[in-house]
Image: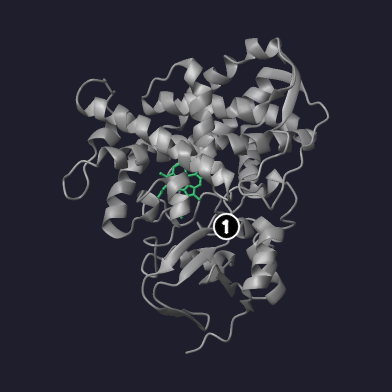
Amino acid sequence: MPNSNVPVVSASEGIKDLFTSGYNFISSNTEQHGSDIFEFVFMGQKVVCISGEAGAKLFYDPEKFQRTGAIPMRVQNTLFGVDAIHTMDGESHYHRKQLFLSLTKDQEKKVSQIITKNWESQVSRWLKSNNIVLFDEAKDVLCSTAFNWAGIIIPDNEVKKRADELIAMVDALGGLGPRYYVGKASRLKTEKWIIKVIENVRRGRLKAKEGTPLYELSFYKELDGKELSSQMAAVELLNIIRPMVAVSILITFAALALYENPEHKKKLLLDSNFKNMFVQEVRRHYPFVPVLGARVRKGFNWKGYEFKEKMLVVLDVYGINHDRRIWDNPHKFYPERFNNFENSLYNFIPQGGGNPSITHRCPAEKITLEIMKATLDFLVNKISYDVPKQDLSYSLKRVPSLPKSGFIFTNVTWK
Ligand code: HEM
């Protein structure tokens, strides 16, 4: 059956639109055409874009979609590593996912204690400095937190270099040219180092504490009873450390939200429930993950549209977090909207959707929230600072996005 019943965005129009609309590319087209599905030809390949809560529910049906063959090599070469959990399906995905779920389960308190200590240890330096860039500080603090939690000790003078490499992998996501090559080189360098660490643990030359991600990934066995190759173990260990460092992007947006909405400061000082709503709204409101991709496992029909086997389907993550059918006044920063918000698993998906023990949804949303809350608590309750004039704008055309100045603060004092 021909798919003549959905809008088709021409390749030339679509490319122009992709570069001018960025994060809003899918939602601007679904709104314009009044359809949650449209087709678009990107680099010679037909891509089906879907949006809306029902679109997310469809996308997370493992009978209909698979991840094998969906993640471009340029993303695997930089962000995730080749053949990582993100690309797996079925039983082997389920088995590996249980490892990630067990590594992250009930860890939020431990991680937030480490990060609070790490933030506090920066203050004596800040008391003597002017114009401190929060994003730079956050990526280093998170890098040292992530390695400490994962069971890898790195000297203080290596933290910045490692943090820069991990952020370069994330920054490569929407980058053509230099950003991509810096991200790829950073992955090669970091993987090489972590492979050595894992081999040292396996040969008993380096002690790793049972229960830490380093130990568990070093000795984890696949369904066939074999250990991961040291390369694969390194890729997956980095799939825990790298995203933790990337929370620095959300932290920078949280500081921006606090600065632009000073009326929330008092409530953040006193009300832990409000702190929770505030960080949820940061995850919803600000741009981070733009889209997710999957391939049709076996042909099916949805809303009269014929999804054919192997078709590439892209889900509008940013758009669903700003969908007028789900959120009133979606472009307003309004934490109170999370009071009594009914989460259906598909209507608020900043870290993916569905049930995380079955789907590819992020296993570390609780950890992410606690890192953000511990940081907000530190910024609001422990220190005072001024925010000088700077360019705090951020672009929806750049993936990932970030306030241009990185959020500069100065005149720091303890409270
Ligand atoms: C900055 C905050 C974070 C964001 C925005 C984020 C976002 C995401 C997204 C969108 C996915 C993929 C969902 C899908 O494919 O359907 C994902 C998966 C994943 N995330 Fe996160 N994440 C964050 C933090 C973390 C942290 C702190 C960790 C580890 C401690 C982590 C570990 C993972 C892993 C291992 C997966 C793969 C799960 C799978 O394929 O089954 N993430 N994350």
Image point 34% across, 37% down: which residue? Answer: 234
Position of residue 407 measured from the top left corner of the image (x, y, whole percent): 71, 31
Which residue is outermost to the bottom?
Answer: 1
Residue 271 in the image, given as x and y percentages of width and height: 66, 31
Residue 306 at least partly seen: yes
Q: Amino acid at mark 1?
A: Val
Beta carbon of the mark 1 residue lies under 8 A of ligand 1: yes
The residue depicted at 53 percent of the width and 18 percent of the height is 117
**Percent position (x, y) of residue 143?**
50, 28
Residue 325 visible to the viewer: no
Q: Which residue is mark 1?
A: 317
Give the class, few, some or many, for how many residues have Cα within 10 Å of label 1's Cα (few <14, many ≥20): many
Where residue 257 sits, quadrant-wise, is: top right
User: Which of the 4 image quadrants contains residue 249?
Assistant: top right
**Observer-nearest residue: 61 or 43?**
43
Asked if residue 131 lies left or right of residue 10, the reply is right
* Observer-nearest of 229 and 145: 229
Q: Relative to 230, is 212 above or below?
A: above
